[in-house]
Image (cartoon, helix red, strand yellow):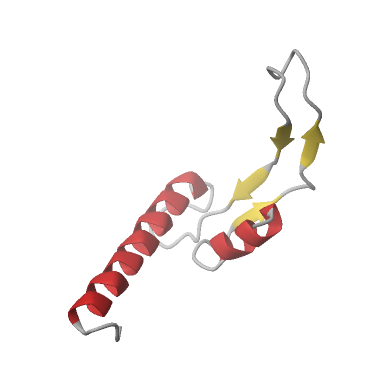
């Protein structure tokens, strides 16, 4: 998946998640251990429901945990209902 695809997916459960600029690609060098380097800059603005909007880092952790819980619940339901979630 491309970086933009992943950003779009994360935005489905963290609306304040934004890519600030285009990814930067660096060729392998001694500085980066001979590896290709991709740099991205993101911003996460919280929803402001329970925490201030500037606490986006906490919002994304909470939203990600809720998403994981939802996915686990879907799997459990599918397993207990014969694949019908």
Give the residue furthest to the front: 82
Q: Can residue 11 be seen in this snapshot? A: yes
Q: Residue at x 30, y 83 (%)?
A: 85
Taking 37 as reference, is 84 above or below it? below
Residue most extreme to the left: 80
Left or right? Give the position of 25 relative to 85. right
Residue 68 position in % (x across, y down): 36, 60
Query: As drawn, is 56 to the left or to the right of 41?
Result: left
Where residue 3 appears, as percent x and y from the top left, is: 68, 53
The spot of residue 76 in percent (x, y) is: 23, 71
Nearest the eye: 5 or 53 = 5
Nearer the observer, 74 or 43: 74
The tally of labels here is 0
Left/right of residue 22 with respect to residue 43 in the rendered view: right
Q: Provide residue 79's location: percent of width, then percent of height.
A: 23, 75
Residue 81's place in the image compared with 79, above or below, is below
Q: Residue, x 79% and y 47% (percent of image)? A: 22
Q: Quadrant of the N terminus?
A: bottom right
Residue 15 seen anywhere in this rendered image of the structure: no
Q: Is residue 14 above or below residue 76?
A: above
- Asked where in the image residue 82 lies, by quadrant, the reply is bottom left
Residue drawn at x 29%, y 65% is 72
* Residue nearest the viewer, comparing 4 with 34: 34
Identity of the residue drawn at 63% across and 47% down: 43
């Amino acid at each position: 998946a491309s970086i933009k695809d992943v950003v779009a997916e994360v935005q489905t459960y963290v609306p304040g998640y934004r890519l600030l600029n285009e990814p930067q690609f660096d060729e392998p060098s001694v500085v980066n251990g001979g590896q290709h380097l991709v740099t991205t800059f993101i911003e996460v603005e919280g929803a402001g429901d329970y925490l201030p909007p500037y606490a986006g880092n906490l919002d994304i952790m909470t939203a990600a945990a809720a998403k994981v819980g939802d996915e686990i619940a879907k799997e459990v339901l599918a397993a207990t209902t014969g694949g019908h979630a």
